[in-house]
Each structure stands twice: as structure tokens, then as C-alpha cells.
Amino acid sequence: MSNAMYNKMWHQTQEALGALLDKEPQKMIEPQRNQVFIFQTLATFYIKYVQIFRNLENVYDQFVHPQKRILIRKVLDGVMGRILELKNEMVELELTEFHYFDDILQDLKLAPQQLDIPIPKYFLKEKLEVIKGREKILAQILADGGIDTSDMKYPVKSIPFDEAVKLIQIAERARQGRLRALFMKQIYLQEYRAKQSKMLGKKVTDTWAAALRIQKVWRRFHQCKETEKLREEEMIFLGMNPPPLFNEVSATVIQAEKVDRLRNEVQIKHEEDYREALVTIKNDLKLIEGLDIKENLQDQIRHWFIECRNLTGTFPEYPDIEEGGSAIIFSNKTIQQVIEDVIANQEEEEKNEKKKKKKKEKQPKNTKKQKKGTKEKNKEEDEKWKMSPSLFLPAMKEGCNAYKEIWMKKDESWNFSQDYDPELIKEEKRKEVESEIRIQVDELMRQELENLKLAVDRERERPMKAGKKKDKKKGKKGKKKEKKAKKDKDLTADRTIESLYKELVEEGLLIPALKVNLSDYIGEYSYLGTTLRQVSIEPMPSLLDVRQLITLYGIWPLGSAAVHEKAPLVKSLLLAGPSGVGKKMLVHAICTETGANLFNLSSSNIAGKYPGKSGLQMMLHAVFKVARQLQPSVVWIEDTEKTFYKKVPNSEKMNEPKRLKKHLPQILKLLKPDDRILIVGTTRRPFDAELQSFCKVYQKIILVPRPDYASRYVLWKQIIERNGGVLTSALNVSCLAKVTDGFTQGHIVEVVKGVLTDQRIRRQIHKPLTAVEFITAITSMNPVYKEEEESFKNWYAKTPLGKKRALAITRGSTEKAKDKGKRKEKKEKKAKKKK
């Protein structure tokens, strides 16, 4: 796509956002009672914002104009925050983390794939050099410590020399035996043919009969191929099979990727030029316009002195530097407006003094009755739902207004290369130069004012009492700060971050994250979510629903500081599900997509490290100090149920798995919106933990299910192809997905890797893959049975959100039953009246 196309996309998206920002306040101001209507309005706004975000993210990634990118980035962060706010509202309304929009998507004519939330590319682009540098340092520390990550991933067993020789001998003898057998078979066939020819005594002379037989065989083979070809063409025409070269990358896609890379290079160059221009243009303005600005400001302030003296009889008080100096008085105002403000302030002061004298009447006695009335009204208002105020709407509105004022109708025919606009920089920098010069002018004009007062009024300035008060306040604040400092002592004040980082890596608490993208977490959407909920059946979440929650609660807040500060704060996240469903993969994906550090505080990993209370305190202090300094950071606690055991098993008492139980709630309290740190726990046996303390630590609990049929179908196809397999008509993937009900992603990956060896991949041309090969390999594994899945569902129903959801469903069903009963009574009464 060209710059013009991206410009057009941006203008269209800005118009859609402007229309949405106009609609949203109108619908959200009025309190509502109908829960279905409320959810539909929230969901439609959520879906529309997601579409806007997708377009804006694409535009921001590919735009080369530096000043446009600054504005788009501001709006992009605002849209991200608003999506998170709407998600939070939907969770509080429906009392569940998973939502289904099937009916709304149909109305908006959108596919479920368009609900997929992309991860902004600038998360990694903007700190690519930092991440690479950190990876090099981490690899160097591991190499110096003798810890090789490659050996940890793929352990290779060493074989003794004698055994290795024996293995080679066995393989060589087998090879020679096979060759000998083939040679003997050829000799046997030659002898057999010679015997047959002797028995017949004469050669076959009927060549016509032989030719006919060959023709029959050839025609049959040729016709079979033709019919197969026709069948394939028909299936492609009907859309049942993909067209040829469907999975191969086309030349246009390769060309588009090249253009994208070139555009990124241009983007970096334009950014550098823009930064240089900010400095040069500012210096030029100081030289050319600096003296004029200084003279104008002095004249303006002198005129203010004289007018105030003429109107009030005294010279005005000059604002202090802390208050903002003369900028407070003259901010976007002319001299006449300033004078009018002075007169208005005088009149207001006179009116207030008169009102204070008159207002000495008693309050009315009927206060109790009024209070009762207000309580009743408040109850009625509480019953109605009302949208909570947004922290991101003002930023988005500012962005839209800036777009309308500057870019909407701007003629850019001169700027074909989409470089920076020098006039806009001049406008911005002129304000900065003016504010810098104003500070100097304020110092001069304060002195001039004092001289005028001495010369004209001959009055001395009265000593300010406010200064003493301020000093007292400062003293109180100082005491508070001292108390806080005592509480939050820096245990490693004498040590550098680099030394702490190295120590944590050597101790195995800071580990390298595996390079796994969130898109590698394969799955399919749940297409029957709303229909099942209408029949009061709670569906198990799909894998892509889980992926969306990881993006919303984990990746977005960690990636963007602006979003993390204002969005509903998620400090901790729990991934609960059976083994093999990809919980660890999701943790590593969060780190990969955001460039976050990964700290491993699992009970098995910290066992025997930093012993005693002081040691544990030092470990946690070091971990969170490094995590804050090098944010974003993810603190991972694997098998986190062990930290909250109801009863510690005898086999694990030596490891002290409950070391972190008391400290985790304290750590969560200390985490602020500025700290981009996320605590992620993974568990496959959540029912072994104490529920209350477990749920207090983890704010958001995500139930990761075993894959359903649709997800298994997609998993089998993609994992086979990724491991070098070729899908043919001989391999019935649908049957394979149906038979493997209950098996997880981990099982499927293990089976595919076991079956698709190098030798088997080479033999695919002659012998295509079949479903039986994979089914025989998977029979030795234990699936996730329905009983285990039900135990996870039952456990989740006991969590705070699960309890609320269950209560809401039961209330809804009782209300429906009451409504039905009332309707029956009305019908019976009508029937009696008719009789």
C-alpha cells in the first residue's frame, strides 16, 4: 500500500472514531435497567473500538510522517485504554471473563476473526536495541556461569565407546543383509523365468494380444487420473478444497513485505530528521524572534501594571515562580481581557462580603424527612445501571480535535515524501521559547514593580504569612516521607542494578524467555456461545477467547505505560487448566510480545535459595527492585497451588513450598500503576490450594480448557504442516480430530514430532501420511477425562466471580419463574371473567 492509501485509511478511521465518540456519551449518560440492552450497547461499542484499533495500529506501524505518528500514538493508546474499560464493564455486568458476540457480529456483518485483537508492533520496535542488548548480557552471564540453555532444552545422552561401536556394527550388518537379500531375489527371479521359458518351449509370437493388454492397462490408468483431476476441480469450484498453490506465498506478498521493510527504514530516517529539526528550529527562533518576544512581553506586563494602578489605585501582586509567573494571567488572553478580569474580581469580592453578612439564618428543621427521601432515591438509583466515567475519552477527544484542526483539510501536495512539517514545529517551539524568555522577563519585571511601588506609592511590602504555613506543611510532609522511608528501606542501596541482575541470573531466578509468539497459540472460536447461554448452559471457553484475555490483561498493559497507568489495574493473573494446554507457552508469549524480563519464583525453583526470613526478604527485594528498574517484567510462579497448600505433603516439606504465602499479598499492595509488573501463576491442580488466600492474591482467574473439536482440527492441520508434513486426501484430519477428543495441545505436538521423523518426511512422496499412524502413537497417552474437566468447572464456580455468576443465573431463573407464574394467574383470572 502507498502513503496515499494509508492516509485515506487514517482519515476514514478518524471519522469513524469521531462518530463513535459523539454517540457514546448520549447512550451512556441515561441510567438503564434492562441487562440485555446494556450488554448489547457495551458489546457494540467494544467491537467498533476493536475495529478502529486494528486500523489505527496498521496506520501507525506504516506511516512515515513523524508528526502524524505522534498524534496517532496518542489516539491509539486512548482506544486501547477504552477497550480495557469496556471489557471491565462487561465483566462486572455479566460476572464472567468470557463474552460471546455472535448475534451482534451478524448485525454488524463481521466475521469472528475480525474480533481478534492485534498486538501493537511498536511494543517491540521502539525498544528492539534494548531487548537485543539485554539478551546478549543474559547469554554472556549464563555462558560465564557454565549454564548452557541449549543443553537444558535438548539433553543429549552420552554413550560409551564400546556400545557406540556395537550399534554401528549392527546397523552395517543389517544394511549388508538387506543388499544380499535383494541380490539373491534377483538371481531367483532370473532362474524362475529361465525354467518357465524351457517348459513352454517356444516364445510368445502374438504381439497384437500383448499390445491390447498394454493399452487396457494404460487407458484405465489415464482415465483414473482424469477423473481424479475433474473431481479435484469440482471440489475447488464448490469451495470444499483450497485451490492449487493456496498455502504458498505469492510474489505480491513477498513484494509487499519488501515495501514494508523499506517503509520502516524511511520511518526511522524521518524520525531522526524530525528530532534534529526540533533543536535547529528552536535555536533559529531564539536568534530571530527572541528579542521581539522579550520586548512584547515587557510592554504587555508594564501596560498591566499601569491599568491596574488606574483602576484599583494600587499596583497588582506579581505571581511567584511556583504559581507560574505572569503566564497565569496572560495565558491565551489579551490585555483588555486581563483588565476586565481584574474589575470582575473586585466586584465578586464586594458581593461575597455582603452575602456573608446576610447569611446568619438557622437551618430548616425537616432534615430527617429529607434524609429519608434521599436514601430512598439513592436506592432506586443504585438499582439502575450507569456507566462509570472514562479516563481515556478526554485524550481521544483531544486527538480528534487536533486531527480536525490540523490534518483534516491540510493541503499536503508539496509533501510527497511525507517528511516533517517545519511550520508546525515553529508553532510548538515558539511557545517553548516564549515560556523560557518569560522566566527571564518575570525576574526583571518583579524588580521593576518593586521600584515602581517604592517610587510611586512609597509603600513597603508586607511580610507574607503564607510562607510560614507552607514551611509547616513541608515539615509535616517531611515527617511522613521519613516514616515511609523507614518502612520501605532499600536493602541493597550499596549495590548496582547490574550486579543484582547478574546475581539473579546466576541463581536461576531470572531466566531467558522462550521466543514464542501469541499467534503460535493455535485455536478456533466458539460459534455457539450465545445460543448455549440463552438455554442457561455455561459453555467452556475456546482457546482464542483465552488468547484474547492474555492480550487484554497481560500484553497491552505491560507494553504501553500510558495504558497501564489509567486502565483498570491488573496486578496478578492465574492460568488454571490441565497439563498440556499451553499455560507455560502463554507466559513465555507475554514476555516475547512485550520484551519483558521473566522471573521464576516457583516453589521448586526457590527451594534452598536465600534461606531464612532475612534471605527471603532479600530475594524478594532484589527481584522486585530489578523488575521495577527494567520494566516491563513478569513474575512467574509455576504450580502456584503449592504456595497455598491446604496440607503440605511429606515429600515436599523439605522444599518449604509455602514460603511466599504471606509475602505475596504485601507485594501486590506495594505495586503501583507506574510499575509495569505482572505476577502470573500457572496451576494444574488448583483444588489443592486454600481458596480464600488463593483468590486474594490472583485478581483475574482464566480457566484454560482442553481443545474442542474445531480447535483440534486446526491444531492437527497446522502442527503437521509446521513439522514438515504434507496434507493429502489420504489423511482424514476430521476423523483424527474426532477420535482424539480429550487430548491436549501438548499430546498432539508430542505425537506429531514422534511420527514425523526425517525418514518419514522423505517417504511422504511415495507413501502419504494416514490418520492411523498418529492414532496408534497417541493410544499410549492419558487424555483429559470429563471428570477432570468437571472438577475444574466446580472449582471455578467457588471462586468470587464464579459465585457471583452462579447467583446471578439462579436469580434470573427465579425471576423468570415468577413472571411465568404471574402470567398464568392473569390468564386464569381472564378465563374466569369470560365464564
Image: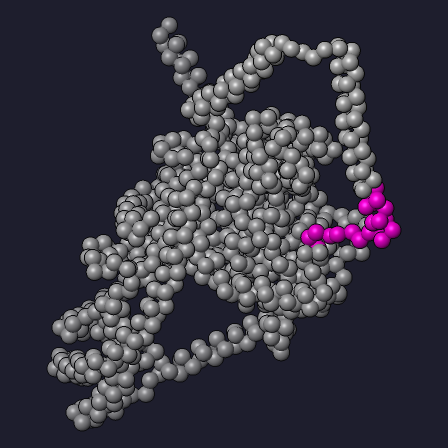
Say which residue appears at 80% left-offset and 38% top-offset. 176
Name which residue lies at 33% across and 62% down.
66
x then y, percent, for residue 420: 29, 64
One can see residue 320 in this view:
yes
Residue 166 lies in magenta, yes or no? yes
For the point 25% across and 84% down, the residue is: 441
Question: Which residue is at the front of the view, 199 or 304?
Answer: 199
Along the horizontal axis of the image, is 379 left or right of 537? left
Near-viewer residue (86 or 453)? 86
Q: Of helix, strand and loop, which mostly describes the magenta segment?
A: helix
Q: Position of residue 207 (x, y in %)?
A: 60, 12
Which quarter shows the C terminus?
A: top left
User: Is 628 above or below relative to 478?
Assistant: above
Magenta stretch: give its range: 152-170
Q: Is residue 92 magenta?
A: no
Furthest residue in direction top, as rendered: 835
* Residue 716, image x, y percentages: 59, 34
- Tell me if I can see residue 350 in this picture: no
